Amino acid sequence: MGKLRDRMVQDLRLTDYSPVTTRIYLHWTTSFARHFMLSPAEMGEKEIRSYLLYLLDERKLSHQSYRQAYAALKFLYTVTLKRPFEIQWIPRRRRRPRPLPDVLAGSEVRAVIRAIEDLRYQVLTMAIYGAGLRVTEACRLRIKDIDSLRMLIHVRHGKGNKDRYVMLSERLLQALRQYWKKWRPSDFFFPGRTKLGHLSPESVRNALRHAAAKAGLNKRVTPHLLRHSFATHLLETGTDLAVIQALLGHRYVESTAGYTRISSRVLRRVQSPLDVLGTPAGQLLG
């Protein structure tokens, strides 16, 4: 794509898209150009429609990946090429209803942590669950991000390139200190083989998968499930939804409110207005 690609990169930076989103958008626009062996500037609605159908019918793309491809082409034609009419009449697939995710009980979280043999992954897992971190945020945790005086963790460049502070639990601080004495990291807390020099999110997912099997759990344990469990357990102990929103780094409270669908304990605490009437059921029915 040459100059067009460079201009799109500039547009994505000016719009403040994250490096991950930028990489995804560039992947799909490049794939689109290679599919027809033409520059996107030479194509329009006909080719976009044909390519999207190809992704659905032949590539059998997942719902989420298809929406990413659509969003990438929409950005390309709307912002970079300034030709929104090429895509504005092509329907975008609706979001699918999300099933309720599993939640780990505290005993299950404990069993997973104990089943991890590598101390790096063990402490990193504690950080994800103990502070509600995303897996990329935990992998990129640096020594300077730990504020033991104020008992806070500085999360840098989270989703949407936003910084935030989350709590540093006493137990996590003890684990980090014990880990540091053994590994003596100088920059990233969890050094690894990525280009930046930290553990990769995929290696964390693999470690959790093996640990869950070793612990005899039937649930699919992922970093995101640990984050779900963190939020749900906070909600069940009475933490305000707005506080959980800030800890998770959610932009919209609606994203956090979804956890109320998960927490059966919170639902059990809610009193039905029927019970507030104060009249026995027999008298109401009579």
Image (cartoon, rainbow, N blue to C red):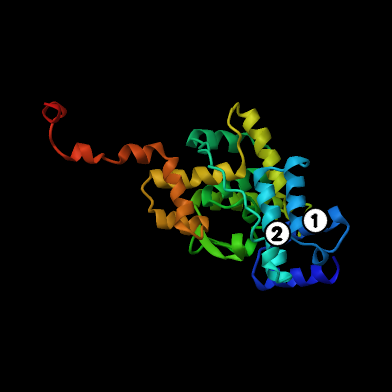
Q: Give the secondary structure at mark 2.
A: helix
Front position in the image: 116 or 93: 93
Residue 281: image location, x then y, percent: 16, 29
Residue 72 disc label = 2
Front position in the image: 135 or 63: 63
Which residue has dot 1 on it?
Answer: 32
Amino acid type at image mark 2: Ala
Amino acid type at image mark 1: Phe
Indicate the quadrant containing the N terminus: top left, top right, bottom left or bottom right.
bottom right
Q: To which quarter of the image does residue 216 belong?
A: top right
Identify the residue at image location x=76%, y=56%. Answer: 46
Identify the residue at image location x=83%, y=65%. Answer: 42
Q: Say if mark 1 contacts mark 2, CB within 8 Å.
A: yes
Residue 57: image location, x then y, percent: 74, 41
Q: To which quarter of the image does residue 233 belong?
A: top left
Q: Give the secondary structure at mark 1.
A: helix
Indicate the quadrant containing the C terminus: top left, top right, bottom left or bottom right.
top left
